[in-house]
Amino acid sequence: MDILYQQNNLVLRSARLADCALLAAELRRLDREELAASCGGADVRKLLESFYRVSVKCVFLQYQNHPAALFGLAPEVWLGRRACVWLLTGKSVEKIPKSFFRAARTLLKNALNEYEELYNFVDERYLAARRFVERLGGVFDGSFVTAGGVKFLRFTFRRKEYGRNC
């Protein structure tokens, strides 16, 4: 097991395929609703497994042996400059808001060392997720897609020097 950080009851480690089933069983309601709208009500465990499989990097956060979050990076093309960043959370994440934010900020910083731009879409109804993206430095560009009758807002994270040397 590749442990990236461990202190008290918090463990951040490289994810394994089996972690998808653990998180699916404890996924927060709003994360579940976002997946249902964006993916047409597909089986959550199978969706998480598909996200895991297309990701070049996937990290699992546990708190008191309960799944707190699963984070992944899926590049558009091999050796590309952009990647889709994704994050889904379990119920236990609500008990560790500061630690969760610090972990997400560190993972994001490391991802931006590898990719110039990270992007994804967030369910417009999921206000906590939108605030989280903005707090981490993400920018909503005003574009969106509609899936399942729900508007999904596009956001990006960019390196500070992005665009200077292109």
Image (cartoon, rainbow, N blue to C red):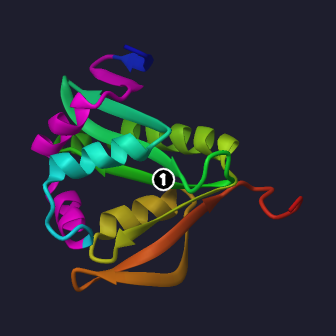
**Magenta residue span:** 8-37
Farthest right residue in view: 165
Across and down, in percent, residue 121 comes to: 42, 69
Image check: 48 left or right of 54?
Answer: left
Q: Amino acid at mark 1?
A: Val
**Which one is in front, 75 or 102?**
75
Across and down, in percent, residue 111 comes to: 59, 43
Across and down, in percent, residue 68 comes to: 26, 38
**Which one is in front, 140 or 147?**
147
Image check: 103 left or right of 165?
Answer: left
Across and down, in percent, residue 94 comes to: 23, 45
Above or below, comparing residue 45 to residue 103 in the picture: below
Q: Main secondary structure of the magenta part?
A: helix
For the point 23% across and 86% down, which residue is it?
Answer: 149
Residue 12 falls inside the magenta stretch:
yes
Image check: 77 left or right of 116?
Answer: left
